[in-house]
Each structure stands twice: as structure tokens, then as C-alpha cells.
Amino acid sequence: MMTRRGVLPLLAAPVLAATRKPNVIFILTDDQGYGDLSLNGNQHLQTPHIDSLAKDGVRFTHFHSAPVCSPTRSCLLTGRYNYRTGVVDTYLGRSMMHGDEVTLAEMLKPAGYKTGIFGKWHLGDNYPLRSIDQGFEDSLVLNGGGLVQPGDVPEAFSGVRPSYFDPVLSRNGKWEPQKGYCTDIYFREAMRFIDENQAKPFFCYIPTNAPHTPLEVAPELVAPFLKMALDDVTAKIYGMVKNIDDNVGLLLAHLKKRQLERDTIVVFMTDNGPQQKRFNAGLRGLKTTPYEGGVRVPFLMRWPGKIAPGTVVDRLAAHIDVAPTFLEMTGVKTKSKMDGRSLLPLLSAKKTEWKDREIFLQWHRGDEPRAFENSAVVTQRYKLVNGSELYDLETDPGESKDLAREQPERVTKLRAAYEVWFRDVSGTRGYAPPRIVFDGQSTVLLTRQDWRGPKATWTPEGLGHWEVKVESAGPYDVSLLFAPSAQSRELEASWLGKHTLKPGQKRLDLKGVSLPLGEARFECHPGLDYAWFRRAGS
């Protein structure tokens, strides 16, 4: 079986023949669909710099992610299905990855790699779940799932209105105002990191929050697409993607200037399908769905001298394969049990047999997954959706004809494979959430992003709680933010007692609070927007 397509053969040079381990740059964009590249047939959007990674390297045409972002991110960084890691959703306390999961950064660092992340982490904002707790030495990240979302640093604490322009980001655990547009900042910081660490191998992770909503972007980037008679939403998204492409161009030029091209693996992919309807190369569905439009994503890789230009791989691959691939490329070993497999054999100069397998993709709202709900089992040719719909991706990539009645035996076989997988991943650790830890050293910011409970929402009417563990009693200075009321009312919070709020009051500051040690549930009535704990006097 041929495992790749391409005009040129792959170069025969041994992958690990270089005298130093290769650098790795991993670019991950947010809600950019399969069709949001000129490479995949978009007639309105030109992405020459991203496309060049395929032109100068390899592109995978049958690559899959989870239907939404946090699950994809945990799979990418661990090589494990997200249900093993604690990440089941994108918010309300369900997008925090257990601190004992081992990330790529933690695997590469002991092998001499410098590690940096610049952009969207979205796997936990507090100790021990932050990027700096999970192996990244140089970290400049946004809070929560995105800027201008409930997890973002509030203006009342930072003095800066949340925005994609001049945002406040967390630099190695400390909030720091930035200048410029968010995507420009991430790539600028990545190039600074490269300059400071070029003497050693480095792992540079650039996960942008663009082109995710809110669609904040410079008008001059939008104007050309409005002239094409595109709607305002699509024009803004394409402007944001154009900005990403420009930054990829700057990054590639920087590598060339620093003579790091041949020593550096550059990978580009997106975290899931598009959120809004627009060109998506004929694929069915959008983000959040298990159809191809929600889970098939671009995956491009360049490594000059090691991967032949213009290579195309059509074998089934997915997010869980990224970590084992990087590890084999860098020659780094790990004891971590992974669900993915290295894609390196597909880049061999020799013809390679690539055994077919099942890839499992699932997501839905809720604290725990339910069997078959919003799920897909994908093989090289066939795909089972929601346990009942069967599609032939080879002849029907748009998933227009359900073959379940014609091939009931195949449906039964794929259902059985799913059931084995579901029991396995659910049995790894169960679905009890990770706890936010008060360790006495780290600032703790409790937001609506991470609270839980049946009434928890992002709206002012929501009411939730946070699962925490106090390892240091304090004392702490505490600031609470909440929606103001026209009437006086009583506020009551765990550990903090009762306080009378005046009409219009929206902040309460308390000094020198001691907390009881041990596991606890932090609650407050009425519901909070934010609770900020920091060492007394800091």
C-alpha cells in the first residue's frame, strides 16, 4: 500500500543524522477551518507563507482533530486522548488538564531543549495546571479560552480593557500589559525566544487565539475582503488569517536570517473546523460537530533536507500522533503511555505499510461524556458518526450518503471498537475535575471559565463553585468582583463570611485572610465574576 503521494521522492538522508537535535516550531491556530487556506482551494483568501510549508515539505490530507479546542490541545501535547487527561470540554471547569499529565515540553526539556509557549494555553490558569507548571520555561499566554472572554484578566485588576489590541497577558505567571495586536505579539515573542535560545535546541509552541471570536482585527486587513463582496464576518476572519500568514512569513524569514532553516522542523495545523459558515472545501459540518467539516484540519510540516518538497500524505492521522512524531524526530524517549503513533514512517524514502486503525473523536457539553454522543470513529476509508451513521470517506468525503443500512456488519464492528475505547479512556482516571491549588506562592484567579455546577454559566445570572485545595493557609489578600445591584444585599463566600453590599457596589477587598488547609469547594452568593487571591502584601 502506498502511504504517500508526491511528484518528488522523499530524501534518503537519515532523520537523526544531524549533529544537534532539531528545533521544533509548532503553530496552532484557533477555529481556522480546512478551507481557510489557498492551498485547499479558497478563491478569496491567499495564504502563501502557510502554503509554502506544504510546497517545501509535506501536507497531510486526512488529518483529524477533536471538534473543539481544549480537547485537541491536550491530545497534541500528551499524545493521549483527552478523556484520559481530564479535559472534556472548553469551559465551566472542564478544560483543565491534570497536572500529572506529561506534556511535550516536559518530555523535551530533560533532553536539553529550551521550551517556550506564546499564545493560547487553555488547559488551566492556576497552579498546578498552568503552562509554566507543565514544562514551559518561557511563557506568555492569555487566560482562559481567549481574550475578551470571562477568563481574561478583568480591567478592574489590570487597568486595561480586554482586547485583541494591547492585551494583558501572563508572562511566567505575572500579568503584563503588551503593545500591539495579539497575533503579532505571539510571533514577535517567539522570534525573541528563538534568538535567545538558538545555541541549543528549542521547542517553540505558538498557539494563536485568532481567528476565534470576537473578531477584532485592524480595518485595513478587512477592507480587501469587503471589496470582494464577502460578508462582514467572513471578511474579518480572512483578515485575521491573512495576519497569521504574514506572521508565518516573518517567522520563516527570521529562521533563514539566523541560518536555522535546516535545523528546524516547522509544523502548522488548526485546532478544529470553522465556527461560522464559509468555504470549507466541500466538507460537511462546522466546529463542534463530528463531521469532517468539524474535525478534518490542515497539517503541514517542513524540514529542509529531511522531507522532500511537495510531499502529500493521504494516510489517516490525528492530533494524538503529534507528540510521538516529534519525539521520534528529535530522538527523545519517554515513559509516558500514548495513544498516538509516530508519523515518521510516512516520511521515509521507502514505501511503508501503514496499518489501518480507528481514530476516536468526541465532544459534547457536560461534566462527563456519554457513549456515542457527538462522536466519530474514523478509519482510512470509513467513518461511523454518532454510532449510527456510516460514510465512505474515499468516495464521499462530503458525507452525503449514509451507508449504515447497506453495511450493518461494518457498523457493528465500528461500534464495538468504540465501546472498547470508551471504557478504556473513561477508566483511566474517571472524570473528577482537577483541583486549583492554593500553594501560597502563586496568584489564584477564580473565574467563570473554571467554575462548575448545574447553574454555572458565563452570564451574570450564573451560579457555580470552584474545586480547590489549600496547601498554604495564607494569609491572602482577596478581591471579589460581581455584578452590581440597585439594592443592598448580603454577600456570603466560603472562608470569607458575610458582608453587606451597598447599592451599585461591584467590588469587595479583604485583607489578611487565612484559609483552612485541605480540599474544599469555594462558593459565593450572589455569584461572582472573579475572585482574586494573592499573598498578603504582594
Image (cartoon, rainbow, N blue to C red):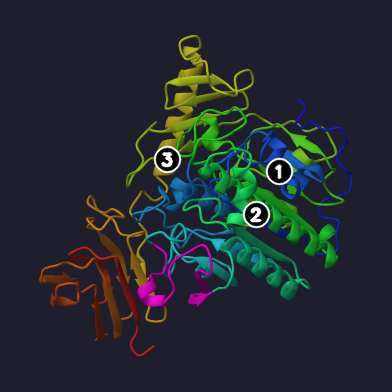
Q: Is residue 89 above or below residue 180?
A: above
Q: Is residue 129 above or below residue 325?
A: below
Q: Position of residue 30 (x, y in %)?
A: 55, 50
The image quadrant that residue 330 belongs to is: bottom right
Q: Secondary structure at mark 2?
A: helix
Question: In whole angstroms, how far apart are the C-alphas of marks 3 and 1?
Answer: 31 Å
Q: Which residue is mark 1?
A: 46
Q: Which residue is mark 3?
A: 363
**Quick one: label 3, few (<14), some, or many (20+) residues within 10 Å?**
many
Query: Which part of the image, by quadrant, shows the N terminus?
Result: top right
Q: Which of labels 3 and 1 is toward the front?
A: 1
Q: Amino acid at mark 3?
A: Trp
Instruction: Name the kind of residue labelled 1 in the image.
Output: Gln
Q: Which residue is at the front of the view, 214 or 441?
A: 214
- Residue 188 place in picture, x, y as percent: 67, 68
What numbered label is drawn on residue 178?
A: none
